[in-house]
Image: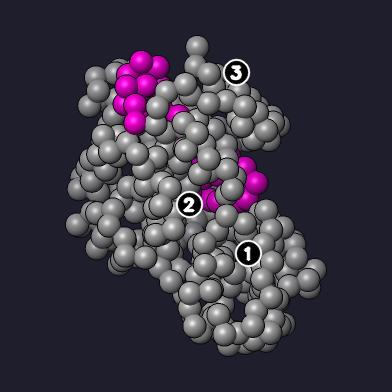
Amino acid sequence: MSYLTPILRFLRCPFKILTCLLLINLVAYPVSASDTLKRIQESRTVVVAFMGIVDNLSPFVLIEPDGEVSGYSIDICLKIVEGIRQEMKLPHLKVQFIPVTMMTRFSVLLDNRADLECSVSTNNADRRKKVTFTIPHFFTGIRMLARTNSGIKEWSDLRNKRIVTSKGSAIVDVINKRSNLSGLDLVISEMDSDKECVKMLEQGLVDAFVMDEILLYSARAAANNPDKLVITGTSQSVEPYAIMMRKDDPEFKKMVDKQMAKLAANGELLKLYNRWFMQPVGPDGKSLNMPMSYMLRDSLRYPTDKITN
């Protein structure tokens, strides 16, 4: 029996998912980080970490009413696992899911409690110091969510204003590294979740919620009064989302990169994208109707994990 089996059974019941968040910190694999493929061979299991329990990360991650996990990022990981299953000739290879937060998504990899993190993690230089990433599966930019009556339309309107973002995101670093933002004398708060950030904005405790643009759409949709909030501001930075892994296991990374390159080359990644961004999804059956960006489409023609930021 896997070390995680008793915990992951909770996922079958949506009411127990939050309990998983507390319990997973007690579990660790007794193997070195460089033995991922060996452990998979022995356990016949790939452990996938995902965010989305606390915040709405649709369509990247969806928690179904019965506790099942799905979504664009999840489907990509499942395709990668299928490729590993075929490469390693493991017909009974299983997938186990671990829920994580923006803060704990790194530690579950570093502590050998998960093999892949499949959500909305940005590949950037700071993070590459402790983890590694495969080929990006989405690109977004940083914008802000403001109240419609605030008069905030561009970043220059934020001078001496209060903004909020989520802990564990890369937003503060982006602000500090860009002169057009760092010189605005912003008062920055960080909250544990996007939901808390939106609540502060709605209550007038902050003037804007700064985050990845695609996540702002989900956050706005989940707000009490979405019509009173607007996504605004010229896009700052380019945020490439990619699946995370431990950085000290080149053989496992090589395997994952190979599967991602296959998905890009055979058109499967485009099919998955259209499934989640161009068709109705989720309990409300709504479609984002968001065609694949030229940046992502072009990157899939020559897939690489090399990112400049």
The amino acid type of the residue labelled 2 equals Val
Q: CA distance from mark 3 to mark 1?
A: 34 Å
Specify the segment rendered in magenta: 34-63
N-term-proximal mark, 2 vs 3: 3
Task: State the quadrant of the C terminus.
Answer: bottom left
Tell me the element at label 1.
Answer: strand
Residue 62 visible in image: no
The residue shown at (78%, 71%) is: 205
| 196 versus 40 height, above or below | below
Residue designated by label 1: 165
Q: CA distance from mark 2 to mark 1?
A: 15 Å
Residue designated by label 3: 6
Q: Are marks 3 and 1 in contact (CB under 8 Å)?
A: no
Q: Quadrant of residue 167?
A: bottom right
Viewer-proximal residue among 28 and 164? 28
Q: Per the image, is 52 magenta?
A: yes
Viewer-proximal residue among 30 and 19? 30
Tell me the element at label 3.
Answer: helix
The location of residue 30, given as percent across then percent down, is: 47, 21
Residue designated by label 2: 120
The residue shown at (47%, 37%) is: 109
